[in-house]
Image: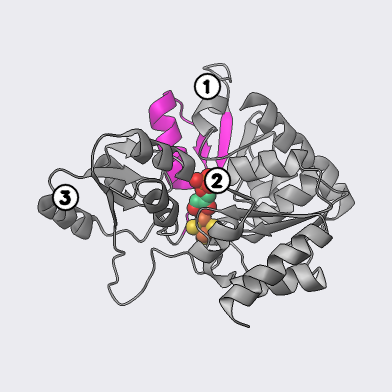
Amino acid sequence: MEKEKLIEEINRLRKEKNAVIMAHYYQVGDIQDIADYVGDSLALAQWAAKTDADIIVLCGVHFMGETAKILSPDKKVLVPDLEAGCSLADSCPADKFEEFVKAHPDHTVISYVNTTAAVKALTDVVVTSTNAKKIVDQFPEDAKLIFGPDRNLGNYINSVTGRSMLLWDGACHVHEQFSLERLLKLKETHPEAIVLAHPECKQQVLMLADFIGSTQALLNYATSSDKKEFIVATESGILHEMQKKNPDKTFIPVPPNDSTCACNECVFMRLNTLEKLYKCLRDEQPEILVDEEIRKKAVKPILRMLEMS
Ligand code: 13P
Ligand code: SF4
């Protein structure tokens, strides 16, 4: 089907079915443009918790759909492609994480939202990259904390809060890929440019950043800055909204180590297309379902996050 027709059909179906379309900043531009809401992981969870739509179409990855379902169990939560997983969530299998947690029974468990429902069910409070510092700061200085699964975000939060949280050794394949060498070259050729980095990047990349933050924070920083050039170390989908909000500014994505791949694009996020979005609204599937026992446990640390944010 042609793009114009797809857009027309999506608009018709979402009205007819009282559906809301939510998209993460890493989605392809066409999906961001048609979504009712575009935001980072925290905003998606906040919107999912309070929408009065009957259907939520979550254009992002699986854990984002799961978070929406956990918060709004009475809604139908759809994702355009059920295969849209997350290498970071995959780096933390629930059974292994449970062993880790059990080995440190006196610790409070803080988990990044990029986790499965089963891992959230083992967690005391969930965080996103937007609120991780704010939430960790609310624990007493001598609190014993576990942080999982992203070691880069965990190291970064340890450094800015002065904590020594125990870290799970997981990472995101996209943010681990950015080339330090190529970032240094970019800085040389664009000496005036501001370097923006997501805290999932490796420490060496974060050390070169002028500003570190979640996708929303990076976007806000670029929009309010009076500088004109930005080098961006995160998934390149965010450049769509950055450019849209700042047509007079230049955004340069940091390339990955391997010049033959498009590894600064998340393969999982890119599985969703306008065509799949149309089909999932039409057929009301694939649907996200969460086991009720797990959901009841997983909702607590997510609600705690929303309160502490
Ligand atoms: P945000 O918290 O910035 O939305 O990050 C989500 C994510 O998947 C980063 O890779
Ligand atoms: Fe997961 Fe990384 Fe993709 Fe984000 S960019 S969804 S952390 S694999």
Residue 168: say if magenta. Answer: yes
Q: Amino acid at mark 3?
A: Lys
Task: Name the residue nearer the viewer: 45 or 303.
Answer: 45
User: What quarter of the picture does the C terminus occupy?
Assistant: top right
Task: Name the residue nearer the viewer: 259 or 272.
Answer: 272
Instruction: Name the residue tied to disc 3.
Output: 187
Please give the name of the residue rendered at 78% of the width and 72% of the height, measured from the top-left corner.
282
Q: Does ligand 1 reach within 8 Å of label 2's beta carbon?
A: yes
Can you tell which quarter of the image residue 50 is in?
A: top right
Which circle, 2 or 1, is nearer the viewer? Answer: 2
Q: Amino acid at mark 2?
A: Asp
Instruction: Name the residue tied to disc 2.
Output: 40
Mark 1 vs 3, N-terminal side: 1
Can you tell which quarter of the image residue 15 is in?
A: bottom right
Whether 7 is drawn above or below 99: the answer is below
Residue stretch rendered in magenta on the structure: 145-172
Q: Which mark is residue 137?
A: 1
Whether 282 is drawn above or below 251: the answer is below
Secondary structure type for disc 3: helix
Report the side of 11 relative to 241 (left or right).
Answer: right
Give how far apart the Cα atoms at labels 2 and 1 are: 21 Å
User: What quarter of the picture does the N terminus occupy?
Assistant: bottom right
Q: How many other residues sit within 10 Å of disc 1, few (<14), some (14-19) or many (≥20)? A: some
Please give the name of the residue rendered at 53% of the width and 18% of the height, measured from the top-left corner.
142
Give how far apart the Cα atoms at labels 3 and 2 are: 27 Å
Secondary structure type for disc 2: loop
Whether 261 is drawn above or below 33: the answer is below
Task: Name the residue nearer the viewer: 294 or 35.
Answer: 35
Mark 2 vs 1, N-terminal side: 2
